[in-house]
Image (tube, rainbow, N blue to C red):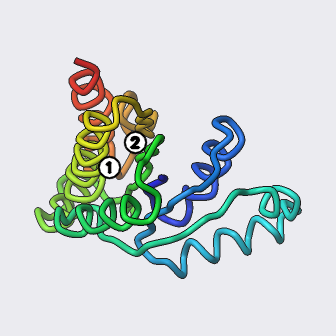
């Protein structure tokens, strides 16, 4: 299972498929069309063999900031396959650069809801399955913006700092 926008989904798919020798990959994408475009782009960039070598891949559209959609997403894969062995949390939104003083609360909340709350909801749903299954691997994708900051991206950097500095270490306990 890989969660993320189309831009990062292909990398997550490659990581899961080749590093973990998976039989099936289940992908949640903000837009299923975006996921399909990512595969087409990979083919255009000469990755035909990679795409052809991938196991079964399915895409389900879901908004990772909505608990009901995450529950539906995991119910879909559990109904179809009976378990989830790996979850890659790669969802993130990134807005046009703006000084922190010009970022309104609506934009900040949207970034936090997707990048931080969404990652938490996906991780929590997966970890509940891990508890039932007895095993599983969770991979959270952070950003150097969470460590060093990023000009014009105070909201994005704050979510990535919270993810890698707070959420990840806490989930390990």
Name the spot of residue 134 as percent of width and height, x first: 34, 29
Residue 37 sits above or below residue 42 on the image: below
The residue that appears at 15% across and 64% down in the rendered structure is 104
Name the spot of residue 97 as percent of width and height, x first: 38, 59
User: Residue 3 vs residue 106: left or right?
Assistant: right
Nearer the observer, 75 or 103: 75
Give the quadrant of residue 110. Answer: bottom left
Nearer the observer, 131 or 12: 131
Circle count: 2
Secondary element at tag 2: loop
Question: In the image, which disc is placed on residue 93?
Answer: none
The residue that appears at 51% across and 60% down in the rendered structure is 26
Q: Do the residues under discs 2 and 1 have CB atoms within 8 angstroms? A: yes
Residue 10 sits above or below residue 86 on the image: below
Give the quadrant of residue 61. Answer: bottom left
Mark in front: 2 vs 1: 1
User: Residue 154 vs residue 56: left or right?
Assistant: left
User: Residue 49 vs residue 135: left or right?
Assistant: right
Nearer the observer, 127 or 46: 127
- In the rendered image, the residue lying farthest to the bottom is 33
- In the rendered image, the residue lying farthest to the left is 105
User: Residue 128 vs residue 3: left or right?
Assistant: left
Give the quadrant of residue 70. Answer: bottom left
Q: Residues within 10 Å of mark 2 (few under 14, many from 20)?
A: some
Question: In the image, which disc is placed on residue 156?
Answer: 1
Nearer the observer, 4 or 132: 132
The residue that appears at 61% across and 64% down in the rendered structure is 57
First along the sequence among labels 2 and 1: 2
The residue that appears at 22% across and 18% down in the rendered structure is 173
Secondary element at tag 1: helix
Give the labeled residue for mark 2.
Answer: 150
């Amino acid at each position: 299972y890989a969660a993320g926008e189309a831009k990062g989904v292909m990398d997550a798919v490659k990581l899961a498929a080749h590093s973990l020798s998976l039989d099936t990959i289940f992908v949640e994408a903000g837009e299923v069309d975006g996921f399909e475009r990512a595969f087409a782009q990979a083919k255009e960039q000469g990755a035909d063999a990679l795409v052809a070598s991938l196991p079964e891949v399915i895409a389900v559209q879901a908004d990772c900031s909505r608990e009901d959609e995450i529950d539906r997403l995991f119910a879909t894969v559990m109904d179809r396959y009976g378990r989830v062995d790996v979850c890659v949390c790669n969802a993130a939104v990134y807005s046009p650069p703006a000084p922190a003083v010009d970022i309104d609360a609506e934009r900040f909340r949207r970034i936090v809801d997707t990048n931080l709350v969404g990652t938490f909801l996906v991780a929590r749903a997966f970890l509940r399955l891990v508890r039932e299954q007895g095993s599983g691997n969770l991979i959270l994708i952070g950003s150097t913006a969470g460590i060093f900051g990023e000009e014009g991206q105070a909201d994005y950097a704050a979510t990535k700092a919270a993810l890698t500095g707070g959420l990840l270490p806490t989930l390990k306990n």
